Structures are given as structure tokens and as C-alpha cells.
Image (cartoon, rainbow, N blue to C red):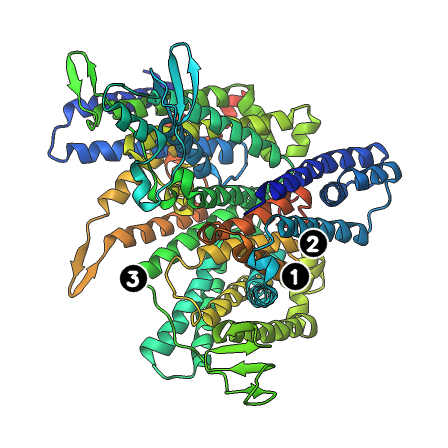
Amino acid sequence: MEFSHIFWTVLAWMIFWAVVGSFVTRRVYLHRDLDTSSAAFVGSMLGAATGPFGLAPLWMNTPEITRRLMVLPALGAVMVIAAAFAFADPSNNCVSNGSFVASQIVNGLILGIIYGFMALGLTLIFSILGVVSFAHGEFYMIGGMVTYFVTTVWFPGINPIVGILAACLVTFVLGALFERMFLTPMYEGKIERPVEYGILVTFGLAFTLQYFIQATVGANPVKAKRFVDFPRIRLPSVEDPWLIKTSRGNMELFDTVSISNPRFMAAVACVLVLLSLLYFLHRTWTGKALRAVSLDREAAAIAGINPDRMNMLAFALGGMIAALAGAMLVQAFSWLPQVGAIPAMRSFVIVVLGGLGSLPGAFLGGIIVGLVESAGTGCVPDAQKAASYIPAYGMMVLTLTLLLRPTGLFGRRFSGGAHGKL
Amino acid sequence: MSKQHTPQLAGLVLIAFFAIFPFVYSANDYPYIMHLLITGFFYAILASSWSMLAGYAGQFSFGHMGFTGIGAYTTALFIHYIYISPEATNLCTEYAIGDQFLIFVNPIGITSSTLTQDCLRQALEIWDGSVQVTAMPVWLGIALGTIMGGIFGLLIGLLVLPLRAAYLALFTLGFSEILRATISAELAITRGQAGIELPHLFENGLTLFGRTFDKTDKLPPYFVMFFLLLTCLGILAWLSKSKFGLFVRALREDQDAAAALGVNTTRYKVLVFVITSMMAAAAGAMMAHYIGIITPNNLMILQMSLVVAMAVIGGVENFVAAAIGAIIIEFTLELLRNSFEVGPFVVDMTIWRLVIFGILLMVTLRFSRNGIISPMIDYFFRGHVAKETVAKRATGTSP
């Protein structure tokens, strides 16, 4: 960066006022006997965005914290960082090259949809069982592996949908079996600290599954063929296809944004499954029962729902969702037994950002994380460094969320049951 | 001999066994077994301090490996970048202290041909052997690493104060991952995946009781690691017997109730983080010097899962059991390494042993929540008397 000191100075200034804002605002609100649950978040964001000029009126007036007061300063803080970056490094691709920015944003959105979809499974498991499943990445990996073996090794040329269905079936059964065998004692109050037990036992499952696959399949990377080819489209005309131009493995929009086929297909599939999942959760009896259990176990049990069966269903369904994401992405990335680690971490980030247990939060969080990652990889000047830092971007989002607003975007406090108290 | 003293006696026998073992044992695989024991001690320190953090205080942190990394990298960077020289180089950043110069070598990273081109190497070439530069002592590096681990433990302890259960686990996991990504990415300073080489614990050899030890001899690091383990266990035993242990366990059971009864929950929660992370950092620094190289892969989640599994299988609510469990598991994992053939199939045990290990972890959690070693120790402690009888005797209702 040419003028990097500008950027670092602005960043230091923002961090300083964010820290001051988070501490003092909380104190001020506490002093005036007001609700402090979001005060630290608002204070830090306002401090980061405006420095002392926004904080002073906040401390003097102590307005009631509304949704607008939370969103606007956060957006402002992001804008200030972006502006500082633009001033500090005017020749960066992210600043000077509009089409690069557009394609980064589109790619970030597409990846974000896939990430969000995968995190959905994790948040479903948490909202019903109160377990943060550390084996989520392994379900993702197994989904990809099963699809690869069915479509490429055992039955080459078979319709990929069969492979995806096989992956879903395998992981659904695996999840249900695991839940029956290892998670049932949690519900009967036999375990003193169920949340920790859940973490450790899923951790053990992750360990076992990962090495089981490595022992049986081997550690060589595998990759499935593309499931579908794009049809050849040239719009508006063959001579000048400025609107959309497709080849078999790629799609180009407006001559600038290029989207690869596997990712696009994965995102489309994720959206379709998401819609059917929403239908299932909101329109069928079983789905409604699932949501009821996630809201209040005891009340659901009184209404005639068997929470134990819902637990099994939720764990199996959550694992299956991860496997579906893996099954769609095995055509995009090369697949290893260790491939689940990074998506699993990312899912943790997303569910915490969206609010543990919140389905729309998981999806929105996924898109935010997708955008943050594509901004991080695209804009950091040193490309090699940027690649090494990829796992850290999400984790920074996670730590910031936990520090400032542990309930996340749409988080709720759980009324009781097996969920970890915040 | 009364039965109450059985566990203490067993402990003493165990300590004596480990103290005498390297002098008695003399098979061909001596260096290998010694290496296993040293690694076992390393994991024992980690597992027992983690059991203090997770089992006693109820703070399920997944950042323990991060603290070992902090210890290891602190000493590595310290020894790699700081030297003492009797003459000024006029190339590096340097400060005169008395008639010596403290030299800060500039980071040049691993960019291909520049490996020998940092400012100190250039100065040495100019001097052409006329000046002797002293490296920093290893022990200072380890001490600094331990202190740095404590500082980071304090920081993390303060940050996680409002977080519980799942949120704490995720936060500490995030901390560990950010640390790993940063170390991998900052090639210029940490050399990324290539890792930093460190001098051995006794780089110039050691002469004790008329015996001279080479720097690659296993005996001195064995006893250093062993004494570190004993020190850590001693500190943990003292802490758990004192008020600290009681308060910390109260914290685990119900933080709000403990606070209401007058326990300074903030102080003890932070303190337990500081103490355990200092132990982890000291072990990490020591191990890095013993191995001779540190890479960011040492902080991987796999390493953390090993520590967690060792502590859980040993018994997470008993740090002695966790330590013994760590040593036993380290040995079992190594013994299971031999692949064998069943008919036409070659069973690659290097991977399958980890599968077995994972299943063992899950089954232990499911059916024996206090681990496997801990109930055995308990059994000895009671001296073959049933649990109920002990409880009755303690309350004094029965003779």
C-alpha cells in the first residue's frame, strides 16, 4: 500500500473510539438504569463511525436503542473503513476497477448463499438440541465423498441426483444413529453439563469420521465431474452478447462478472432446498412441531409432541443439510478427508453472527461472511498473505460478534431446557 | 500400612519409576522410548492443565494449543531475532548496554535467496570471524514465553468473562485459529509453514556428575520435561486443595450462585485462565526447544483434539488422572502404529489407530463420564470400600 499509514491511523482511531464507546456507553446506560443489552454494540459502532462527535450526543441523550440506531452506525463504520482504504490505496483493484468489484460481490453472494445454507443445519441442531455440533464439517465431507463415489467410481454416468440423494440418505441415517446412541442421555438429566457433553461427544464423532474416511478412502484429493453443463446462451445477440454469455462451465454477465458453473448450480440448489425446507418447517405438522420444540420443550411436550423424536429428526436433518452442501460442492473443489474443517469453522462464525438458533440469521450471516471473505481475499494487497488469512477473516467476525453482541443479529435468549445459558 | 495412604504411595512409586527408568532401561529403542516419554510428559502437562480449566473451572476452552503456540513462538522469535554483540554492526537496529550491544535482526522471511542476508549475517561476513556474537539464553526465552502465555491468558480470560458454554468454546476456537492464520500469513517474521528452527535445550551439551551429554541426548530434556510436569502437578494439587479449588468448582457448578455467596467470580475465572495458559505456554516453549523446530501446524485443531481426548479419557475432573491418561494414550497410540495384513488387505494402522481413539473417546464420554483412569484412582482412594460407606463415614452417621 502506498499510503498505508493513513489506513492504519484511521483504523487505530476507530478502534480506540470503539473501545471507549463500548465501555462508556454501557456505563452511562447502566447509570441511568436503562436497558444495557445492546448498549456496548451501539456505543462501539457509533464510536468507530463518528468518533467522539457521535458518542457525545449519545451519552447526553441516552436514546432508546432501536433497530435503526444499531444498523446505521454499523453501516457507517464499514463505510469509514472502505473510504479510508480507498484513500490509502487508490490504485488497488478494489478501488479503481469497477468490474472487479462487481464480480467479487457476485461471487461473495453466491458463496454466501452456500455458506448460509450449510450453517442452517448447524443452527437447526442448536435450536432444538442445544448442541453445537463439532461434527458438522465431517457431515459436509461425507456428503461430498458419497456423491463422488456414487457418480464417479461405482456408477459412472449415473444421474448426479442419485448421488446427492444417496449422500442425503447416508448422512441422515448416520445422524439419527449417532443421536440415538450418544445424545439421548442428555435429555434425561443424567449429565451434569449437557452443553459441554454435546460439544465433546460431537468432537469425538468428528475425529472418528474424519479418520475413518481417511483410512478407507485414502488421503488423495478426489473431484467429481461437473453435474450439468450450461446450455449455450448468447443474449441479446450472438454477435454482441453483452448481457449474458455462457459456455459449458462458465457464465459471463454484462461482460464483467464471471460465475463458474459448479458454484452457480450449488447456489441454485441451496436456494431450492432452502425454500422446500421453509415449506417443511412452516406448513407441515412435523416442521411445526420442530419449531415448537425449539421455542419451548415443555410446552411442546404438553401439546403432544414427542421432543425426543424431534431431537433425532433435527440432528439427522442438520447433518443432511451439511451433506447436501458438500454434495453440491464436490464438483467445485477437490475433496479430502480434512476438507470439512474450514467450512465447519465458517458455519460457527455464521451461526454466531446470525444468532445461535435463528434460521433467517444463519442465512443473512452466511451472505455477510461470504462478502467479507471475498472483500478480504480481493482487496488485501499481498495476495499470498490474503490467502493465508482467509480462515481468520471469519474468525474475526466471530470474536467481534461475541464481544459486542453475543446474541448475534437475530439472536434470542432461550427460555430453558438443554440450551447453554448466555 | 493404612489404606488411606495407598494413592499417595502409588504416586510416589510412579514418580520413582519415571525417575529411575532412563537409567535402568537399555534396549535398542532407548532413544525412541525416551522420545515417547518426553512427548507424553508434554501432553500430560497440557491435559492436566486443561482438566483444571475445563473439569474444575468448567471453562471448556479450545484455545489451549494456541497458548502453547504463544509460548513456543515467543521463545523462537526472541532467540531468532535478538543477539548480543561486543561490537556495533552499524547495520541492524542496536542499542548499547554497557560495552555490549543488543542487536535486533531485521526480519527477512524466507524469500528464496535472501536466507543468509539479514543484517547480522552481513555484519558477520564483514567481521570475518573477528567478533563473537552471543545468542540469547534458552532459559530466558522459555521464561519470556511463559510470561507471554500468562499475558495472553489474562487477555482471553478478561474477554471471555461474559461468555459461557458453547459461546466460550467457539470464542477460544476462534482465538486459536486467528493465531494460526496470522502465524502462517506473516511469512516475513515467522517464516509461515516453513517454521522457525530453535536451538536445543542444551545447545552446548551439558556435564553433570561427571557425565557429558550431547545436545541431542534424550536424558537432560527428559528430566527437564519431567520436572516441569511435576511442578505443574504440584501447583495444580496445591490450588485444588486450597480455597482457589473450591471457588473455582463453585464457579463451575453455578456462577451466579457462587457470586451471590461472595466468590469473586471475575477474579477466579481470569486467574484460572492465566495459570493454565502459563503452564501450556511453558510446556510449548520447552517442547519447541526439544524438537528444535516450531511450525503453525502445531496449533492445529487436531492437536487440540488430542489434548481434549487425553484429558477426557483420563478423567477430566481429576488432573492426575488426566496426566496419566495422556502418557498412557501417547504410548498406546505409538504401539498401535504397526500395520498388519488381513488376507489380501493391508490395514494401515497409522490411521486406524486414530479411528479407534475417536471411538474410545465417544464411548468413554457416553458410559463413563469421569474417564477411565479417574474411577480407578477413586477406587484406590476409597480403599476397596463402597462409595456410600465413605460418604457415611465422612458425615459421621456411621461408625
Among numbered discs 1 and 2, the one appearing first in the sequence: 1
Q: Label 2: few (<14), some or many (≥20) within 10 Å?
A: many
The residue under label 1 is which amino acid type? Leu
Local secondary structure at mark 3: loop
In space, the residues marked 2 and 3 are separated at their CA atoms by: 41 Å
The answer to the question of whether label 1 and label 2 lie on touching residues, with beta carbons closer than 8 A, is: yes
Label 2, on which residue? A409
Of residue A136 and residue A129, the one placed in the foreground of this image is A136
Local secondary structure at mark 1: helix
The residue under label 3 is which amino acid type? Gly
Name of the residue lying farthest toward the bottom? A238
Label 1, on which residue? A364
Q: Is B241 drawn above or below residue A82 in the view shown?
A: above
Q: Is A82 drawn above or below residue A53 in the view shown?
A: below
Viewed as shown, does residue B119 lie left or right of B217? right
Residue A218's label in the rendered image is 3
Of residue B331 and residue B209, the one placed in the foreground of this image is B209
Which chain does the residue under circle 1 lie in? Answer: A
Name of the residue lying farthest toward the top? B98
In space, the residues marked 1 and 2 are separated at their CA atoms by: 9 Å
Question: At which x and y percent is residue B342?
Answer: 17, 61
Local secondary structure at mark 2: loop
Viewed as shown, does residue A275 lie left or right of B187? right
Viewed as shown, does residue A113 lie left or right of A206? right
The answer to the question of whether label 1 and label 3 lie on touching residues, with beta carbons closer than 8 A, is: no
Q: Is B190 drawn above or below residue A349 in the view shown?
A: above
Residue drawn 38% across the image and 54% down it: A208
Viewed as shown, does residue A255 lie left or right of A66? left
Q: Is A30 drawn above or below residue A283 in the view shown?
A: above
Question: At which x and y percent is residue A198?
Answer: 52, 50
